[in-house]
Image (cartoon, rainbow, N blue to C red):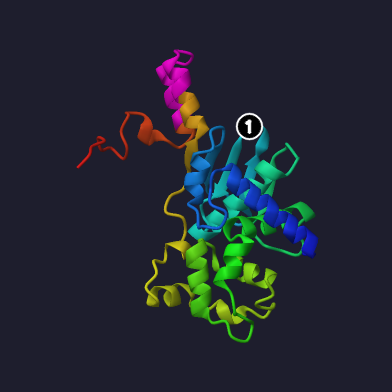
Amino acid sequence: MNNLQTLIELDYQATTLRKKLNLGESSPIDLFAVANNIPDLTLVFYELGDNISGICYKDIGMIAINSQQSYGRCRFTLAHEFYHYFIEQREEKIICSKSLSKESSHEEKLADMFALYFLAPYKAFKDKTSGLSNETITEEQIIRLEQYFGMSREATLYRLKLEGIIDNNWDRFKNNVIYNAKILGYDDKLYKRLYYSNITFGRYLSLVKELKNQDVISRGKEIELLLTAFRGDLIEGEVNGEESRFD
């Protein structure tokens, strides 16, 4: 599947979507913030179990991300779901497996490769890896790459493999990942489970507010809809029980 023409097309699609979303062509991005600024998109973080990484409900404008994954993997999953949401033509619900597997369907493999290019575009990644080879690359260089682009270790290794910098013998780079990143002075957030779960952002919440402001729904219905979205923190107009303030 990884023929040159396919990879060029996927990089083009990723770069084009970055432009459409008013992002730089090569700079690192806060992907969750990007998703929250897509007007018609609802983003849900939910514990989806051991086998599912994400779900794209294109027909209703919703993406669900498995919050049991690491922060870096959640970023990859969201970029993967962007392929289904913006690029792929299917409209039905698409459930995506956790594993980057040879057994994945053709479209799932395309979505995986798209995610790698969306997070780490060809030119930017080429600049950062200039001069590296399978014989010379070190784990410190890999850590700096994954921290810069905000990718999990597995995604970073796949991205390096796409450029022919490493081969399939990458097990030597899978040990003591968190410790080795911390000893270089990096935060370990990228490698740890997402810091929240079972929460909704985006269009769903603004739509509930619109319906209530227009008296289309009652206060009771508003509360029900917010609880359905795991947003009980919004029921009293407060966040985490504290009144909003500026210090």
Residue 27: give x, y in percent of width and height.
Answer: 51, 57
**Which residue is most to the bottom?**
135
In the rendered view, would you say 33 is above or below 118?
A: above
**Residue annotated with mark 1:** 60
In the rendered view, would you say 134 is above or below 151?
A: below
- Residue at coordinates 56% horizontally, 32% vertically from top-left? 40
Residue 6: give x, y in percent of width and height.
Answer: 77, 58
Looking at the rendering, in which quadrant would you find the C terminus? top left
In the rendered view, would you say 191 is above or below 226?
A: below
**Residue 49 visible in this rendered orientation of the protein:** no
**Residue 113 visible in this rendered orientation of the protein:** yes
- Residue at coordinates 46% horizontally, 55% vertically from top-left? 194
Q: How many tags in the picture? A: 1
Magenta stretch, main secondary structure, is helix
Looking at the rendering, in which quadrant would you find the N terminus? bottom right
Q: Mark 1 falls on what kind of element?
A: helix
Is residue 80 shown in magenta? no
- Residue at coordinates 63% horizontally, 63% vertically from top-left? 122
- Residue at coordinates 22% horizontally, 39% vertically from top-left? 246
Q: Which residues are magenta?
A: 209-226
